[in-house]
Image: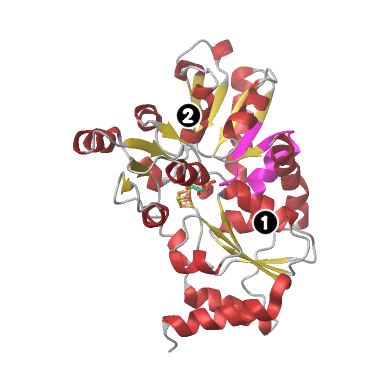
Amino acid sequence: MLNKEEKLKKIQDIKKEYGEDLLILAHHYQNNDIVSLADYTGDSLKLAKYAQENKKAKYVVFCGVHFMAETADILTEDWQKVLLPAGGAGCPMADMANLAEAETAWEVLKIEFDKDLLPVTYVNSRADIKAFCGSKGGSTVTSGNAPKVMEWALSQNKIVLFLPDRHLGENTAYELGIEPKNMAIYNRKTQKVEYECPKEDVRIVLWDGYCHVHHAITVKHIEQARNSLPEAKIIVHPECPFDVVRAADGYGSTEYLINTVKNAPAGSSWVVGTESNLVARVKAQNTDKQVYILDTHSVCTNMNKTNLDNLLETLEDIKNNNFSKQVKVSKDIAEDAVKSLDTMLELC
Ligand code: 13P
Ligand code: SF4
């Protein structure tokens, strides 16, 4: 059994040996050990761009969840291998929309509205959902560029089908001036679309998916923070419910949350509503400020599945030409999925 220092040393030695042939990417929700070993850390948007721009690494080790590794695979060249250290690291929200459900929804909405539709999917989605969007002229979106992509989508005089995160869709559309009454919800269980305004006033249909980590944050958490820390500013991730985002002082991607605190004046106080690894690191990196987590239960167990053991195992596998941890999107899916990713990356 190796101790922590021995594992760290072994990983660093393999990194040195492989040099530019190896790229380690880590999402901001990864733990400190993993972040300390990464070549780059970022939000989903930044990581997708790092993967797309790197034309040197034969091996891209993605410390994050499955949809992120799939995105990296779609955006890298065929000769580059993307590996995910923790095999079971999925994203429950991404799994809330599968291709059969999306195809059913498309037919339901076509009959319901008798108007052109445009699909937009959060990158937190399966590759076949990205392909579904790409094949229909739609785009992907991340929390880091949601307003820009949504503006593009809404300007096309079509009904936007936004999937799978209801909250990101609702929060972004509202920011662009769409009233909640003009947003419909697609209920994937009943396969029915629900709305209260006249049919011709519906601008966007929101899939009813959500991230359980952010969905659990409530206005009560905001009220408690306001009472106990009246001087603090509260910032949250846009995967939080609409009323939470409205009650907060600001919202944005993980990169936004980090930079907002980093750029704030010394002595200021911040309450951050997102995953706990990120908030703990922001706190440790901003000792001249007070930093608190909005909901102490905000833990993404999937992001936490990556550890020194499975990272080391992945690198040793590479040395042994064992690619069992490779994430490979099939060619037919990747061909359409890349269209929706390219649309987003060209817009932003
Ligand atoms: P970001 O794109 O803001 O990093 O968010 C990804 C994610 O999974 C948040 O739950
Ligand atoms: Fe998925 Fe939520 Fe975890 Fe992000 S925090 S990876 S959306 S489950």
Residue 318 visible within the image: no
Q: How crowded is mark 1: few (under 14 residues within 10 Å), some or many (20 or more)?
A: many
For residue 70, above or below residue 223 = below
Compared across the picture, whether 81 is left or right of 99 comes to right
Q: How crowded is mark 2: few (under 14 residues within 10 Å), some or many (20 or more)?
A: many
CB of mark 1 within 8 Å of CB of mark 2? Answer: no
Judged from the image, the secondary structure of the residue bearing numbered disc 1 is helix
What are the residue bounds of the magenta stretch? 119-139
Q: Which of 338 and 296 is in front in this view?
A: 296
Q: List x then y, in percent, for residue 15.
A: 63, 76
The residue singled out by tag 1 in the image is 72
Q: Which residue is drawn at 51% across and 10% down?
A: 198
* Residue 24 quadrant: bottom right
Compared across the picture, whether 230 is left or right of 321 comes to left
Q: In the picture, which quadrant includes the C terminus?
A: top right
The residue singled out by tag 2 in the image is 171
- 114 drawn magenta: no
Q: In the picture, which quadrant includes the N terminus?
A: bottom left
Kind of residue at disc 2:
Asn
Q: List x then y, in percent, for residue 324.
A: 63, 75
- Determine the residue located farthest toward the bottom in the rendered image: 1
For residue 300, above or below residue 125 = below
* Residue 13 quadrant: bottom right
Residue 295 visible within the image: yes
Question: Tag 2 or tag 1, which sits nearer the N-term?
Answer: 1
